[in-house]
Image (cartoon, coloured by chain):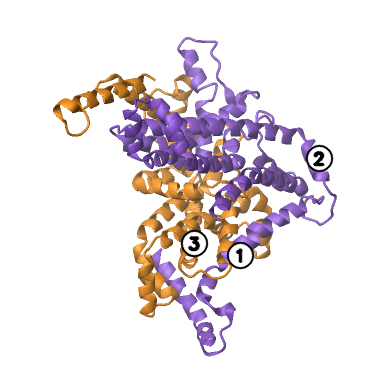
Amino acid sequence: MFPALRMQGRERTALTQPADEMSKSERPNPLFRNLNAKVASIPMILTAMVVFVGGTVWTVLYSFTNSKLLPRLNFVGLDQYYRLWATPRWLISIENLLIYGVISLVFSLVIGFLLAALLDQKIRFEDTFRTIFLYPFALSFIVTGLVWQWLLNPDFGIQHVVRDLGWTSFSFDPLYNSSIVIYGISIAALWQGTGLIMCLMLAGLRGIDEDIWKAARVDGIPMWKTYLFIVIPMMRPVFITTLVIIASGIVKVYDLVVAQTSGGPGIASEVPAKYVYDYMFFAQNLGQGFAASTMMLLSVAIVIVPWAYLEFGRRK
Amino acid sequence: MSMANTTVQTSTAAGARQDVTEPYGPKPRRMFSRRNIFLYGTLIVVALYYLLPLYVMVVTSLKGMPEIRLGNIFSPPLEITFEPWVKAWATACTGLNCDGLSRGFWNSVRITVPSVLLSIAIASVNGYALANWRFKGADTFFVILIVGAFIPYQVMIYPIVIILREIGLYGSLSGLVIVHSIFGMPILTLLFRNYFSSMPEELFRAARVDGAGFWGIFLRIMLPMSLPIFVVAIILQVTGIWNDFLFGVVYTRPDTYPMTVQLNNIVNSVQGVKEYNVNMAATILTGLVPLIVYFISGKLFVRGIAAGAVKG
């Protein structure tokens, strides 16, 4: 890794040296001041302006066109959005995203915090437990989804095992039952993601001054009350960043659904990200894909903008 | 609830005794107190739940198909067979290719290695420029970059398809490497910028006085001092890029699919008889690289995701 870096460094120095000398001898041009730093930032500037800003503006602009197979600037106003919100598959996607989002938020926060609180009791083998709770996070959503697809398989998995034990009417087939399929997907998502939340919460708990605990103990406040009324309010920043992380992960949910159900049974477990992908690359209805992705952007903005405003507005 | 009460009781008991004998340090706890049984009991049950899928994966992959059809997914294999692993690696079919996951594995290696190197090279220099050589407007671009990290990928997928098509890299591995470098940039730049900012300013000033320039300071002073953060960045990127599915499926063709995409195609293919043992072997094989990275790196992995997550 380092030789590669060094080589690149030398090449760039060679390229930018004359410009530096020129700026010294002639009248200093502000454009050439600190030139190396500007050269080093070109990838960032290109990414920020061309891909992030340019790409977003482009997609939003083309969401007002009737592009089909190829992007064309043939404006049709809000037609794509009307069509989008009249498509049952999109409505189901949104509903699923909401259910999945609420489950992810509530359960990963609660479970993550409880696990962190348990690990924070000065227990033995803390590292072992933490390693076990966090390892699913190293796995991809595809691997996670496929494992849980196998565990929840009604013919072989948990349902089959419980029925073999004698409880023959036992039914647990969330991935094959269209009314609860999104809950089945959430099980896998929670298994994969709670470890991360636990780690963040644990870091937050470790940041609480030991004296707070001592003071609460001296005052005879029960432990759960100390957590609920003293520690959690003190961890507000940690909770907010965790919330933002979970929320931005929720909108992205795609691979997990593809691996576990491919959107099925029927269209019962469709999600917006999958809708976008399918309309852009399979249905060859680019306009619909752009409109749907713009709606995704809008939903993220609703979460992120107030947070960024609070976070950065206050700092200034 | 009971845990809370017992703790409070023990602590008050300790406090009462303190007046008489002035003991030093906390009161030694009994190993099998109610608190400990509750605490460790809960942790062990939860740990078993987290380990269960891994166990089932391994067990299933070592069984033959007849045993899977008759038996119980939790029971250990009666007859251990490695045939599913061989088949998953070498002969499992996706579409027309029947050379197993090995193709996807090598594709993923050819994607991950250059992507990790390129993204870290760009981001480290960039973070250094932002920390020590700030120019006018640099912070604006940086804020755009960080805010951009929250934009759903779906918004930018198609414009990137067009850009890659224009420069003739759409569908190639190099195209995907560029995409990974682009989307790795916000978090890595943040990581490096924060790390370089936390270095003592005197170091930088002294080097400046001695006549070192932009690259001289970076290569001779910053790089040697920032090995830990490079390791964190490598861990972050290797697991992230290896586990990627969306970019792989959008920007590559069937014969250059990364491992995750190929795995999904093998397992979720609708043709043929489902071979669950082969599927599980393939799943483990795909998960193996990030798992190995995770278990070797240990605390650095935690540091990486914490740095990445909290600040990102």
**Residue B59 visible in the current orientation:** no
Q: Dot 1 corresponds to which residue?
A: A46
- SS type, badge 3: helix
Label 2 amino acid? Answer: Arg
Task: Indicate the chain on which mark 1 is placed.
Answer: A
Kindly identify the residue that appears in the image at 65 percent across and 62 percent down.
Answer: A50
Residue A20 horizontal/vertical position (percent): 51, 83
- SS type, badge 1: helix
What is the distance, in whole Å, between disc 3 and disc 1 at their CAs?
A: 13 Å
In the figure, B203 relative to A237: above or below?
below
Q: Dot 2 corresponds to which residue?
A: A83
State whether discs 3 and 2 lie on one chain.
Answer: no
The dot on residue A101 is: none
Quarter of the image with the C terminus of chain A in it: bottom right
Q: Pick the residue in front: B60 or A2.
A: A2
**Residue A172 visible in the current orientation:** yes
Label 3 amino acid? Answer: Ala
Residue A222 horizontal/vertical position (percent): 37, 24
Q: Pick the residue in front: A155 or A99.
A: A99
Quadrant position of residue A292: top right
The dot on residue B123 is: 3
Image side of residue B167 versus residue B203, left or right: right
Marks 1/2 in contact by CB < 8 Å: the verdict is: no
Classed neighbour count for the residue bearing mark 1: other residues with Cα under 10 Å, few (<14), some (14–19), many (≥20)? some
State whether discs 3 and 1 lie on one chain.
Answer: no
What is the distance, in whole Å, between disc 1 and disc 2 at their CAs?
A: 34 Å
Task: Indicate the chain on which mark 2 is placed.
Answer: A
Q: Colour in which chain B is shown? A: orange
Classed neighbour count for the residue bearing mark 3: other residues with Cα under 10 Å, few (<14), some (14–19), many (≥20)? many
Chain appearing in purple on the rendered image: A
